[in-house]
Image: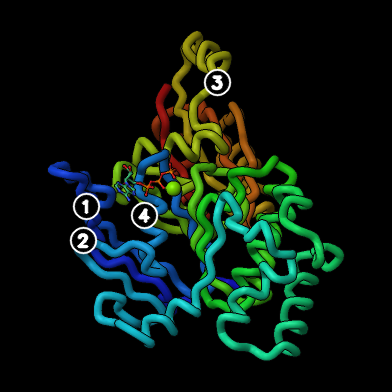
Amino acid sequence: MSSTNETVVRFINITKDFTQGKNVSRALNHVSFEVNKGDICGLIGFSGAGKSTLLRMVNELETPTEGDVEVLGHSLKNTKGKKLRDIRKRIGMIFQEFNLLESKTVFDNVAIALKLNGESKDYIQQRVTTLLEFVGLSDKKDSYPYELSGGQKQRVGIARALATKPEILLCDEATSALDPDTTESILNLLSKINKELQVTILFVTHTIRVVQKICNKVAILEHGNLVEFGNVIDIFSNPQSTIAKKFVGAVIPNVIPKGIKDELLKYDGKYKLIRIFFHAQNATDDVIWQINNRLNVHTNVMFASVSELQDVVLSVITLQITGTEDDFKKVYDYISSRQIEFEEISL
Ligand SMILES: Nc1ncnc2c1ncn2[C@@H]1O[C@H](COP(=O)(O)OP(=O)(O)OP(=O)(O)O)[C@@H](O)[C@H]1O
Ligand SMILES: [Mg+2]
């Protein structure tokens, strides 16, 4: 499902202080941002950044010390009783450690919320069968959790979270306990849930590859502060903060390799280095050709990286341009006229 302008979760100036005895520690510090219907929003940060605390506020497992969370148009601060329970029913959650009931079969684990809601036996039978088919576990319905692999357990966790047809799915490190291939298949499943069932997803992780693979939005937290928030493509193209540069640098090299740097230091002509960001596969087709041939300015590709984001391909090319100040200006004007993002970099 593509992102829309309808906000489903709005964090408004959230502060959270934990008090232990006489000590007060601040886990979240005036955090504000919003998640729209159809988004897969990654919450990323190092351990202790406040990711889980923030996520858990969406279904009131945690309450803010200051600020408010609006969920599906309702202020959680001002909503109580049955109305609050109704909102919580519209939210599902999955966890790193799966949290399955070991003494119950796969079928019964998935059926829990439906039984609690007093659904009929026939409906439960039909709904659980559909869900197990959706997550690819039809043949495991009578198995117990100990008979399943980590990836299969997470599929049960996902089916259980989807049982009541939630509009929002909260995922806390849902793939952190899984190997890379299994992680990939779970991320594909979450993507399918977002697209086919129109579920908005908030995904806590400390792995930027997860954000790269499935998220369209990302919020970067550091020591309880929101340091960056926006579209994944924008933050991957142009990370501002040190921490964002560090995360993005892990998937898109933004440091000039030493060998190339040494070569450039030896070079005594006049040149500029620029990094160009192309947001689509075909955008690179003729820009460099045009600079070389139409503008008659000599370029040299120093290095390039291509990363596949959720639905775009981001290519970053570091280019050496050799010439006069006039040549540099011509090139910059030309790239700007093509509405392609670039920045000048230094060694
Ligand atoms: N119930 C609690 N009581 C006291 N302090 C808490 C509690 N829950 C979290 N904290 C503290 O709040 C801060 C943020 O914790 P949180 O679990 O949200 O971090 P996180 O980003 O999810 O980290 P991780 O990646 O390790 O899961 C930490 O310093 C943590 O010790
Ligand atoms: Mg956590």
Q: Which residue is mark 1?
A: 17
Pick the residue in front: 40 or 152: 152
Determine the CA span between mark 3 and mark 2. Answer: 46 Å
Circle 4 packing at 10 Å, graded few (<14), some (14-19), many (20+), is: some
181 horizontally vs 277: left or right: right
Q: Where is residue 111 drawn, in percent x and y?
A: 67, 75
The first of marks 1 and 3 along the sequence is: 1
Determine the CA span between mark 4 and mark 2. Answer: 12 Å
Say which mark, if any, is on residue 65: 2
Determine the CA span between mark 2 and mark 1. Answer: 6 Å
The first of marks 4 and 2 along the sequence is: 4
Q: Amino acid at mark 4?
A: Thr
Determine the CA span between mark 1 and mark 3. Answer: 43 Å
Pick the residue in front: 341 or 126: 126
134 horizontally vs 244: left or right: right
Residue depicted at 64% across the width and 69% down the height: 160
The first of marks 2 and 1 along the sequence is: 1
| Dot 1: element | strand
Pick the quarter of the image with the C terminus: top left
Q: Which residue is mark 4?
A: 53
Q: Amino acid at mark 1?
A: Asp
| Dot 3: element | loop
Q: Which residue is mark 3?
A: 257
Residue found at the very far top of the displayed protein: 266
- Identify the colour scheme used: rainbow
Determine the CA span between mark 4 and mark 1. Answer: 11 Å
Q: Where is residue 67 drawn, in percent x and y?
A: 22, 66
